[in-house]
Amino acid sequence: MKRHTASYAAKPEESRGRLFPEAESPPRSVFERDRDRVIHSSAFRRLKHKTQVFVYHEGDHYRTRLTHSIEVAQVARSISRALGLDEDLTEALALAHDLGHTPFGHAGERELDKLMTPFGGFDHNAQSLRIVTKLERKYANFDGLNLTWEALEGLVKHNGPLIDAHGHALGHFKESGLPQVIIEYADAHDLRLANFASAEAQVAAIADDIAYNAHDIDDGLRAKLFDIIDLGDVPLVGEALSNVLKLYPGLERSRIIHETVRRVISGMVSDVVTQTKKNCAEANVKSSDDVRSQKRATVQFTAQMAENNRVLQAFLSTRMYRHERVLEIMDRARRVIRDLFEAYINDASLLPEDWRDHGPATDRSHYARQVCDFLSGMTDRFALDQHKRLFDLDPLFR
């Protein structure tokens, strides 16, 4: 049964298709198949042992990239349903958005980008595209997952257009230029990089922000990096906390945290649904291509909620991501990435046989990218095990 009712929803029967044509697989739609292929990928399974903020040895109850992705999918699906969008495409994008992340979270990504600077750098969104178009090797007729055009455009453009009307890179890529994998794939299967992505992709992106905020409050409190009282002056969170304390005086700490966080999520979800409907009405958005052709994102918070979100993220940046405990462990994690990269780049025999260079012997960039693919795909545990095997020390715990 089709749930989407909005005229601007992505329609599976109108999909621009896959790079490698395939027969349909009823009763699933093409977007359902995209979601299923993401879930069954090796890269998705590895997310269970990749750091969100806390490395696995610090506790079993902190979020990982896998639990984060599942929470993003839940939030995104709720928003998508409220807006009458295609829930399967939304869910596929939410589940796939972090496939390209390195071990040890953003610290690992920054270190690998630094090490790869001479060879084109590293970006986790571009790496997600590499994974779903090249590195997953299961199907007989193609490399990658052969996702639909809509899934791939959403994966690379969920944060907005990548180039301007003149072809100049925008945003994160303005200085460095577009990653080669995006350029190559767009040449073969034009992703319309100067346009916004579908409403479904934009929902997945804003759900990422909502889930991040909510679970980082939860994890930060659980880790005692800050206390409940510190949230009193943070917009939205402070109001939610005040309501909980008034309704449930004497409630135990763990329940206060949960009740506060769930109110934060509900408030942000309601806000984005209201504002997005308003945006669509004001711009007379009637189709998914209308969404793509807008001059600004269609799926948005109200101005007040966007400001609340900015203040909350600034609080978390200062009190959690830059907390001395987090910085200390991430400094050690960066050492693991650096040591492994230098070892592999200088001795190809250290790589597994199926990862050893098969490109031109003189192409240093090709080999560096192969090392990068291998290293970025590691889980935290595997990276630590490899470091201990090669260097006979455990830098996270010494």
Image (tube, rainbow, N blue to C red):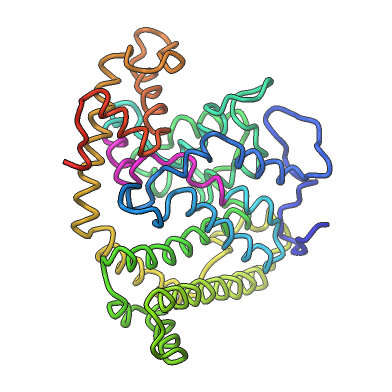
Characterize the magenta stretch by its predominant secondary structure: helix
Residue 100 located within the stretch drawn in magenta: yes
Q: Residue at x 36, y 13 (%)?
A: 363
Which quadrant would residue 134 be assigned to in this image? Answer: top right
Q: Nearer the viewer, residue 143 or 218?
A: 218
Pick out the residue farthest to the left. 398
Expressed as whole percent of the image width and height from the top left, the position of residue 248 reads: 45, 89
Expressed as whole percent of the image width and height from the top left, the position of residue 324 reads: 18, 57
Image: magenta residue range = 94-114
- State left or right for residue 10 relative to residue 13: left
Residue 397 located within the stretch drawn in magenta: no
Where, quadrant-wise, is the N terminus in this rendering?
A: bottom right
- State left or right for residue 30 relative to residue 340: right
Which quadrant would residue 37 be assigned to in this image? Answer: top right
* Up-down relation of residue 387 to residue 9 (above or below): above
Expressed as whole percent of the image width and height from the top left, the position of residue 8 reads: 71, 60
